Amino acid sequence: MSIRFAFAAMLKSKRFWIWMITGIIIYLIPVTIRYTTGSIIIPFLNWPGYWIDHFIPGNLSEKMLVNMFFPGAAGAIAGEVFVGHQLKRFLTVKMKYLSRFAGAMFFVSAWSLFQFLGYQLAIYMPFSPGSNLFESYFVYPINYVIAACSIFTPTIIYAIKKRYSKNSKKQNSQIFMI
């Protein structure tokens, strides 16, 4: 299958859109909290609370939680779906994780380019003078580390979903047996 058709099949994939939309929503939650509260600090997501050198941001826990879904896991699923349609077969475990890695790296690169261009525009937050709306380029290396780890996020989420649905069915069947 050509790249064009694999890309079109990826865009038609329900799984791709579920991960993409969910990832974007998760990414936008802290942004919404910042704009509604008027503060750049979200107390329960602001660990360690101060920058460590230039590379570890003060909101590391938020960055890890959010970036594990978007652009990380969304890109991983995009890569998996794209390669699966490109090869026209089920992927082996090794191929699945390699395609997830490539997709996550592509998405984080595209997102970092967007962040870099926005940072260069020097758009500051209205409620916090001196705070650029976009990420500093110093945190891009940690974005790649998080994206590399986020290839496992879909596997973990699917395992939790499978366990929950199995327990839910078991409880429902016990209720009906009474």
Image (tube, grey):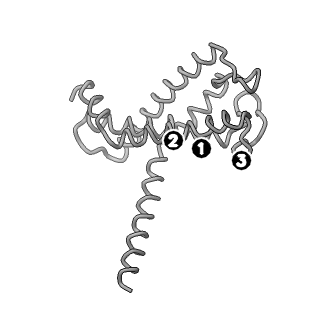
Residue at coordinates 63% horizontally, 24% vertically from top-left? Answer: 134
Disc 3 designates what residue?
A: 44
Disc 1 designates what residue?
A: 65
Please give left or right for residue 146 compared with residue 55 in the image.
Answer: left
Disc 2 designates what residue?
A: 69
Three-letter amino acid code of the residue under disc 3:
Phe
Q: Alpha carbon of mark 1 to alpha carbon of mark 3: how far?
A: 12 Å
Quadrant of the image occupied by residue 172: bottom left
Residue at coordinates 56% horizontally, 36% vertically from top-left? Answer: 28
Marks 1 and 3, the one that precedes in the sequence: 3
Q: Alpha carbon of mark 1 to alpha carbon of mark 2: how far?
A: 7 Å
Extreme-front residue of the structure: 36
Between disc 1 and disc 3, the foreground one is 3
Identify the secondary structure beneath mark 3.
Answer: helix
Quadrant of the image occupied by residue 106: top left
Residue at coordinates 51% horizontally, 41% vertically from top-left? Answer: 69
Q: Alpha carbon of mark 2 to alpha carbon of mark 3: how far?
A: 19 Å
Indicate whether 118 appears above or below 26: above
Indicate whether 55 appears above or below 96: above
Residue at coordinates 62% horizontally, 38% vertically from top-left? Answer: 30
Between disc 2 and disc 3, the foreground one is 3
Extreme-top residue of the structure: 121
Image position, residue 61 (x, y; %): 67, 43
Is there CB contact under 8 Å for labels 1 and 2? yes
Quadrant of the image occupied by residue 139: top right
Image position, residue 93 (x, y; %): 36, 47
Quadrant of the image containing the C terminus: bottom left
Image position, residue 21 (x, y; %): 44, 38
Q: Residues within 10 Å of mark 3 (few under 14, many from 20)?
A: few
| Mark identifier at residue 51 | none
Image position, residue 129 (x, y; %): 76, 22
